[in-house]
């Protein structure tokens, strides 16, 4: 998505409450829906921008991160384009930390695998 100013896309202030963002989204979505506009490609693209903006600003955590990044390259941050959920990202991060000796992550805690490893996958 080329547009990164999600507040501008929805036409709301940066300090707008969540209820106002939701109300504006519900007004804009039907106005630009392609089925109601004879399949106009311009309205379809505009609706995609509106949906993306609401996807970010309508969720408290995503909006907080977007505000912290000042709308910079939010779309390109970790897996956002692919739509992976934050819980899945957290799970993948925790899994990648297994076996690094951190103590809290579980796994073999740096002992490695194989004959002298922690007992898993011994060959």
Image (tube, rainbow, N blue to C red):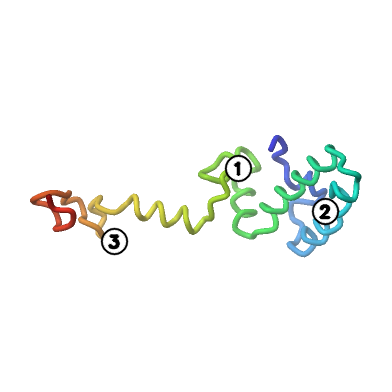
Q: CA distance from mark 1 to mark 2?
A: 22 Å
Q: Secondary structure at mark 1?
A: helix
Q: CA distance from mark 3 to mark 1?
A: 30 Å
Q: Is residue 93 left or right of residue 14?
A: left
Q: CA distance from mark 3 to mark 2?
A: 46 Å
For discs 3 and 2, the disc positioned in front in the rendered view: 2
On the image, numbered disc 3 is attached to which residue? 104
Q: Are marks 3 and 2 in contact (CB under 8 Å)?
A: no
What residue is rendered at 25% in x and 50% in y? Answer: 100
Q: Nearer the viewer, residue 50 or 69?
A: 50
On the image, numbered disc 1 is attached to which residue? 74
Mark 1 or mark 2, earlier in chain: 2
On the image, numbered disc 2 is attached to which residue? 29
Please provide percent x and percent y for residue 121.
Answer: 18, 53
Total numbered badges shown on the rendered structure: 3
- Crowdedness of circle 2 by 10 Å Cα count: few (<14), some, many (20+)? some
- Crowdedness of circle 3 by 10 Å Cα count: few (<14), some, many (20+)? few
Q: Secondary structure at mark 3?
A: loop
What residue is rendered at 72% in x and 38% in y? Answer: 3
What residue is rendered at 73% in x and 62% in y? Answer: 18
């Amino acid at each position: 998505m080329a547009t990164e100013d999600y507040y501008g896309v929805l036409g709301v202030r940066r300090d707008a409450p969540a209820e106002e963002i939701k109300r504006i989204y519900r007004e804009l979505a039907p106005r630009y829906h392609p089925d109601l506009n004879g399949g106009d490609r311009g309205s379809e693209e505009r609706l995609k921008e509106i949906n993306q903006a609401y996807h970010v600003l309508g969720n408290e955590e995503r909006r907080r991160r977007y505000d912290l990044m000042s709308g910079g390259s939010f779309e390109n941050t970790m897996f956002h384009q692919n739509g992976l959920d934050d819980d899945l990202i957290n799970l993948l991060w925790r899994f990648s930390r297994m076996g690094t000796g951190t103590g809290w992550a579980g796994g073999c805690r740096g002992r490695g695998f194989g004959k002298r490893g922690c007992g898993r996958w011994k060959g």
